[in-house]
Amino acid sequence: MGRRGAGTTLLQRLSLLVLLSTTPPVPPAGTHGCTSVAVASPVVPLGSAVTASCTVRSELCRGLERGKIRIAWMLDSEPMAGSQHRGPGGAEVSNLTVPHFNRSQARLWCLVEWNGTRQRVGMAELRAGYPPAKPFNLTCMLNLSDYGLTCQWERAADSLPTTVALKCATSRAQREAAGEAVTGCIPRGARRRCTVPRRLLQLYRKMHIWVHARNALGTAESERLCIDPMDVAKVEPPTLLSVQSVPHQTDCVSVAWEAAGSSAHMELQCELRYRTPGEPAWALVPGIGGPARPAQHCGFLFGTQYHFQMRCRRPAPGGYWSEWSPGRNFTTHEKAPAGRLDAWWSARPAGAGRRVEVQLCWKAPPRREANGRLLGYRVALSPRRRGREPPAVCDTADTQCNFSAPAGAGRVYLSAYNAAGESAATEVVLLEKTGRPLGGLRAVPAGERSLWVHWELPPAPATGYVLEWHPTSSEPPGCSACWQRERDGGTTRALIADGIEPFQRYNISVYPIYKDVVGMPAYTAAYSKQKAPSRAPKLHLKSISKSHAELCWDSIPVEMQNGFITNYTIFWANSTADVSSAVVNSSLNSFVIWDLKPSTLYKVHIMASTAAGSTNGTSLTLVTMVLDDIEIQFLFLTLGLIFVLLILLMICFQKNGRVKKQFWPSVPDPANSSLSKWVPAELQQEPLQIPGVREPGLATISTVTVLETVAGKKLWGKDPMAETTRGFPDLPKSYIQQDGPDTPSGSRDTSEMSQECYRNGGETVQYAQVVGDGYKGQQHIPSRLYLRSSSTQPLLFNCSPSPKPYENLWFHGVAPERLYGQGSKEDKGFLEEPLINFPLLQGLKISGAEELYDFQRF
C-alpha cells in the first residue's frame, strides 16, 4: 500500500509538470501561460508594505479541474498566507499583502496545490531601500595644464542602484532652457570625482555646477556652485631667485622671485614662509604682490640660518594655492652677544681656609641674545675697566667651570663671545648658603616627561628660587642640564621639563634666594611615571627550624624599581597547595614565617609592588627541620651525659673489686693454678689419660694419688717428716680443722662449719697436678697440665649449691688411716673424711704425687 501510494503521488507530480510544460512560454512579467504574478511596485522603501496577486486560468492549464485549485505563497523560503477568490472568466485569484518588507532583496513565489502536490508557477523579485542621499562638499579646481575642470564631492552609501552625474550650465542657458542643463561628466564606477573637458567650459564667466543622483525611489541634487572656472584655477609654484640682507637694516632680508610661465599673465597673490633648522613651525609672511618688486621682511635673528619657500594663487576667495616652491637657505650676519647670563654656583673651602674651590654653572643664552654661533665663555675675578681685559680664570666652550679663588672673593664676572665680539660681563655674587630652607616641598607628575614641584613660601621674602635635580641612579650628567632659576619670589611651584624621563627617579632640591644670602636646600624625590618593577628581589634563607623560617632579600636597584616600592608580599605554600601570604613594609628586607609544619617542604616567592603594578620573583624551596636547635642541643647533651655516665661506671667496675664482684662473682680457675709446680719433673712426663664421656650425674673420683714418704729420700733437700709442718705453706684456716688436742673433732657445731666451709683464705693454696675428667656431651680437647701455683685467688666466695655442706678435710690434720678408719693420735694433720667427698675433686684425677709424704693410691 505504501509503495502504491508513493507511486500515485509521483505520477500526480509528473502529470502536473506535463500540464504546466504544455502551457505557452512564460511571459517576462512573472507569468506562465496559465498563471500570472503581479506586484504593485518591485522596488519599495525599506519597511513599507508590499502587495501582490497571483492569477491561475484553469482553462489554459489542461488537466486542472475546476474547484480543486489552491494557490499558496512563499517569500524566499518563508510561507506566506494570502486570500483566494474566483476572478473574472473563472480564473482563480490570490492576493497577498506583506505589511513590513524589511529585506533589501527577496523573491516572491506563487505556488499551485493540486491533488496534494505543490508546484511553483510564478515569481516576482522585490527590492527595498532608500532614495538617494544628497551629495555634499562639492569642490572644483581648474588645471591650467589642460584647462579641464575637475570636481569632487561626498555622499552617503547607496542602498539601491544609483546613477550619478556632474552637471553644469551657464546662467543664460539656464534662463532660456528653463532648467535644462548640460551634462558635464559621469564618474566611472563608484568614483566620486570627474573632470569636465575644456570644450564644455566658458572661462571668465559664471557657471552653475552641481551633482545629480537618481535611483528607483527618487532623485537628489547637491548645492549648486556659481563660479568662474578661472577663479578656481591652481597655478604653478613660483621660483625663488635670491635672498640677501637689506643694507643698513641688519635684521631685514630681501627675497627676489618670479612666477611660473603658465601664470605670468595672471594677477597673483603670494605668501612667503621661513624657519630655522630644527624648528617645526613656520613663520608666514602674507600679502606679497607680483614679482615686479622683491619681497622684504625684518625681524630675523643675527647669525642664524633660515629656510625660505613661496607659493601663489589667483586673488579670488575660492582660489587654490599652488604648491610650495623649492626652498632656499640663507644665514644672517652676526653681532656681539647681548643680555645677561643666568648662573649658579657651589663653593667649598680649600688650602687651609685661604682659598675657595668654586664650581660655576651657567645657561647658554637664548638664540635671540646669542646673535650668532657662540665660540666660548670667559670667567674673571674682576670686571673689565677702560678696555683692559682682566685675567681669566676660565675660558671654555662648555657651560661650567671649576676654579680656585681667594677666600675673600665674593664676586666673579662671566661673559660670552662670538666671531663678532664679546658680551657685557655678568656679575655673579657668591652668597653663602646658610639661610632658612623651604617647607612643604613635594613633586607630582605633570606628564610623562615633566614634573611639577610645589613648596610653601619661606618665612622671609625671597627674590627667587633655584631648582636642582638629577637621576638617583647616577651622578648628574652636567650642571647646566640639572638646574633652573625661578625669578618670581612669590611663586610656590615650578615646572621641570628638561631631561625628565619616565620610570626614572629624580632627586630634587630647591634653594630659596634671599637678598643677602641663599637658603639651605629642601629635598624630595619623584617619578614622572611609574610602572611595575623590572624584577623582584631574590630570596635568601637566613635560618630555619621546625616551625618557622627567617627570609631575607636585597633591595632592588633603583634603576629597576620603576617607581616607589610600596610593599613586598611573601607567598608560601606546602605540597597540599595550602597557600598563605603576608604583606611586608617596603623599608624591611627580612621576614619570619611562623606556624610552619615540621619536616615539610615549602615553596616561597616574593612579589614587589609599586603604585602602578607588581612583579613576582623566583621561587625558593625550603624544608623545615624535624627538631629545633634547642631540642637538638638538648638531645646531644643528654646522649653525652649518658655516654659519660657509662664511662664512669666502667671505670668504677674496673677499679673497685667489691662492685665488680657484685656483678661478676670470682670462680677458681684451675687453669691458672700453680699446683703443677709441686709435681717432680719425671712425673710431668707421665702421659695423661682422659676418661671417657660419662653420663651426667654425681661426679666421682677416678683415681687419687696419695703422696707418701719414700725412705731415705728428702724432698727439696730436707727431711720430709721433720718438715711436715713446714713443708706446706700456711694453709688457710678455713680448710684445716681447728680442733684442739682436748677437743673432739665431732664437737664443732655443724652450722658453724657450714658457714665457714667454703670461705676462701688470703693465704697461698698448694695444688698437685690435676687432670680434668670431662662430662658427657663435652668436646674432647687435649688435657692440660696445671703446674704449681702460689695463687691467692679465692676458690669459692659463697656456699656451694651442693645439697650438703662439705669441708676440705685434706688440710684439717687427719691421718690417712683415719680416712679409712685406721688413723691414730699422731695423724691429726691429715684429712678426716674421704677425698671422694671433696667438691673440687669430683670428676678429677690427682696423679704424679706418689713420692710426696707417705700417701697411698687407692
Image (cartoon, rainbow, N blue to C red):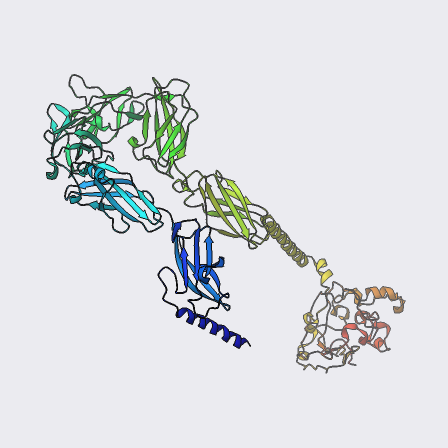
Q: Note whether residue 347 is visible.
A: no
- On screen, residue 54 versus residue 843, left or right, reads left
The picture quadrant where one finds residue 702 is bottom right
Q: In the rendering, at what x and y percent does residue 799 appear?
A: 80, 66
- On screen, residue 247 versus residue 179, left or right, reads left
The picture quadrant where one finds residue 852 is bottom right
Q: Is residue 583 above or below residue 341?
A: below
Q: Note whether residue 137 is visible.
A: yes
Q: Nearer the viewer, residue 275 or 472?
A: 275
Label tally = 0
Q: Is residue 484 above or below residue 189?
A: above
Q: In the rendering, at what x and y percent does residue 754 appear?
A: 84, 66
User: Which image quarter holds the N terminus?
Assistant: bottom right
Q: Is residue 77 above or below residue 669?
A: above
Q: Nearer the viewer, residue 530 or 261?
A: 261
Q: Nearer the viewer, residue 682 or 221?
A: 221
The picture quadrant where one finds residue 471 is top left
User: Which image quarter holds the C terminus?
Assistant: bottom right
Q: In the rendering, at what x and y percent does residue 530 appear?
A: 41, 39
- On screen, residue 210 versus residue 731, left or right, reads left
Q: Nearer the viewer, residue 626 or 606?
A: 606
Q: In the rendering, at what x and y percent does residue 95 appear?
A: 46, 56
